[in-house]
Amino acid sequence: MSEFTFLFRGSDLTAQSPEEMQKSMQKWLAWFKELGEKGCIKYPGHPLERAGKVVRGKQKSVHDGPYAEAKDIVNGFTLIEAKDLPHAVELSMGCPILEAGGSVEVRPIRILDM
Amino acid sequence: MEPSDHLFRREAGRMVATLTRVFGVHNIALAEDVVQDAFCRALEVWKFRGVPENPSAWLLATAKNRALDVLRRQRTAHTFAPELGRLLDSEWTLAPAVEELFAANAIKDDLLRMMFSCCQPRLAEEAQVALILNILCGFSVNEIASAFVSSHAAIEKRITRAKKLLAASKRLFDVAAPAEFAARLPAVHRALYLLFNEG
């Protein structure tokens, strides 16, 4: 088994009624439950606040940010256990954020064999 | 834990009613924003961490904290509920006053008061009912349109106009005024009927 991180981008929150928001949440819960039952969740992860700071370069300059388009901002992450990259990609297919036009970035975690 | 069916929709009405009482009826849009914000937070946190033990209490506490934030930051620039007098003006009374307004019994009264407030005699009954379904019962424009067998655009217009008119009324309806109470009762009944019909 290898480890992967899912980085979630884009939002499924666009002026929805309470009922629609609940449906969206239930889709997420169902997806997480399915991953959990398959034993693929290493760590459920966290949602991230939109606004933070960006510290950059040797000068260590501090900026508000990230100021990217909403669809490009990472708004949460999860750690996944999967056989290989294709398997991890397959697992990401069920993510409800995709239906709302968002994206899941699937990145293998590099583990050093000592 | 699985959230119960229609949890958000049920809580939406209670939260908007209470927040409108706190902010004043002219700030109903602000109340709706705070509710939307609480749902966004719930959606973001719960999908990663699971649904909390008592989701209703979680939502209400989130809305209450956000309300306190708004009141603290904007009380110099805005006037809030005139019914509450100067309770919200000072840090001494603000938190206990808001705490009391969010108590379970107070919220029940708020729902009723809000329901009658939506039945503004200057609005057509159709508009009154649409308003109740949208604000207090958490129905989307689409769902209301299908209940009324009407178009999305027509219902959206009707609700927007009705909200403006409601926001322009200076105070929330006084449930203790018997004469007007009777006049507004039929529309309240009709909204309740549609609510149970739609599920």
Image: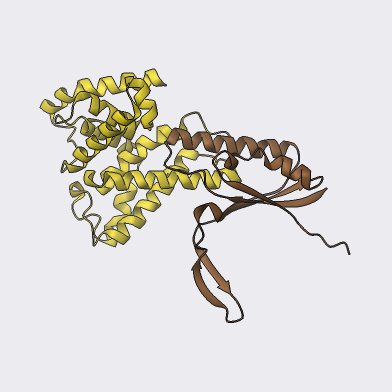
**Residue B132 location (% of width, % of height):** 29, 30
Quadrant containing the C terminus of chain B in the rendered view: top left
Residue B49 visible in the shown view? no
The total of numbered circles placed on residues is 0
**Residue B12 location (% of width, % of height):** 39, 37
**Horizontal placement of B139 versus B190: left or right?**
right
**Relative depth, front residue between B30 and A11:** A11
Residue B37 visible in the shown view? yes
Picture layout, residue A18 above or below residue B26: above
Image quadrant in which you'd find residue B154: top left
**Horizontal placement of A9 versus B64: left or right?**
right
Residue reaching furthest right?
Answer: A114
**Colour scheme:** by chain
**Horizontal placement of B150 versus B182: left or right?**
right
Residue in the picture at 21% in, 42% down: B167
**Residue A78 location (% of width, % of height):** 66, 50
**Residue B23 location (% of width, % of height):** 27, 48
Picture layout, residue A9 above or below residue B189: below
State which chain is coloured brown.
A
Quadrant containing the N terminus of chain B in the rendered view: top right
Residue reaching furthest bottom?
Answer: A59
Image quadrant in which you'd find residue B156: top left
Image quadrant in which you'd find residue B104: top left
Residue in the picture at 81% in, 47% down: A84
Residue in the picture at 25% in, 61% down: B90
State which chain is coloured yellow.
B
Picture layout, residue A81 above or below residue A110: above
**Relative depth, front residue between B146 and B173:** B146
**Relative depth, front residue between B162 and B67:** B162
**Relative depth, front residue between A83 and B93:** A83
